[in-house]
Image (cartoon, coloured by chain):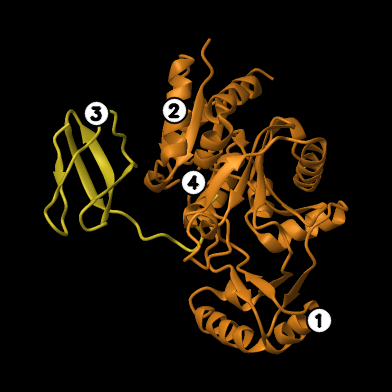
Amino acid sequence: MEPIHCIGCNCKIEVPDDILKGEILDCIDCGLEFEIITVNGNIVQFKEAEFEGEDWGE
Amino acid sequence: MSPKIGMLVDIIRWTEKRILDEAKKRRVNIEIIYGKDLFPEISSKKNNFNDLRKHDLIIQRCVSYYRGLYLTAILEDMDIHVINRYDVDRICGDKLLTTLVLAKAGVPNPKTKVAFSMESALDALNSLGYPAIIKPLIGSWGRLVHLLSDEATALAVLEDREAMSIGMPLHRIFYLQEKIDTPQRDIRAFVIGGDVKAGMFRYPISKTDPTKKEWRTNYALGGTVEPCEITDEIREMSLAATKAISDASSTPVEELILGVDLVESPDLLVLEVNHTPEFRGLETASGVNVAGLIVDHLITQVKS
């Protein structure tokens, strides 16, 4: 898969081959988290992940 | 014919990926249903998401409690079988309702009081004695679960909760619990289909890093896990809690997937019951293929 670049620090983020829409990737440099919103071939689109909500959990 | 199973998610965590992987190993396709993409018309029965009806079963795995709860209500209204059911989520996702159900069924649980104003909360805490614990009604991962060591601390935390209630009115309902003198650990028992399939001890991060003062055992807070043998007492108490949820939600025990949290005091008490339990730490600690058991359970439920 094509890597993505962190929108915070431009660090390269590797994307696993079995990535799915809805998975979260994090930038190991600055800690920002990104949610995968589309997977098209070996290209993914992403957005900054939702901030943890008060109702999040198990 | 292969069962038609769906998995309702908002994001895909490690646990959901594990379930998908185990389904693939069994050559069972689990279709991912992204709750955030749905916009069902609920004002009539002619909603435009009839495609969802093709599923024999949908497992609800949303990380957001309310998203999962209301989507389950809509799916059930479409006569779709969801595990866990709306009434299970409604009870287990709310600590107050869970405590009521456990108490009604006679399942031992920590002494708990609920107050609806700061003044009565302070009275409740004085009667419980310090230290005590305050927990939000909704939420997980130890978030906003605080130790109230004395009245001054309690006053500060209660004032903060009052201020937070502007955005989230539930913070004005104070769920207050005695601090159990435990061996610095609690127990997670994973119940599938009416039996305890795996267990683990959970320790706070302070066990491995004494510089930390953390007392909460949540894995999400850096807590560590160890294998826990399922003793007769653990099995009995976990299934008593499961039965209580089953009865209160009119759901067969055999259908439920629950994570029961217990503390040793030294007799076991049930702390809470989780309706979309995670199991990353549990698989690590126990070596049990929890994801595989969940998939097998879903297949069994479709067949039954």
Quarter-wise, where is residue B197 in the image? top right
Q: Which residue is mark 3?
A: A17
Q: Are marks 4 and 3 in contact (CB under 8 Å)?
A: no
Depth check, mark 1 against mark 3: the one in front is 1
Q: Which residue is mark 4?
A: B62
Q: Answer yes or no: are tags 3 and 2 on the same subunit.
A: no
Please tell me which of labels 1 and 4 falls first in the chain.
4
Find numbered disc 1 in the image and state the secondary structure of the residue it sits on.
Answer: helix
Find numbered disc 4 in the image and state the secondary structure of the residue it sits on.
Answer: loop
Q: Is residue B233 left or right of residue B13?
A: right
Which amino acid type is marked by label 3?
Asp
The C terminus of chain B lies in quadrant = top right
Q: Position of residue B264 (x, y in %)?
A: 75, 53
The Cα–Cα distance between marks 1 and 3, rounded to whole angstroms, is 57 Å
Q: Answer yes or no: are tags 1 and 2 on the same subunit.
A: yes
Q: Is residue A47 left or right of residue B61?
A: left
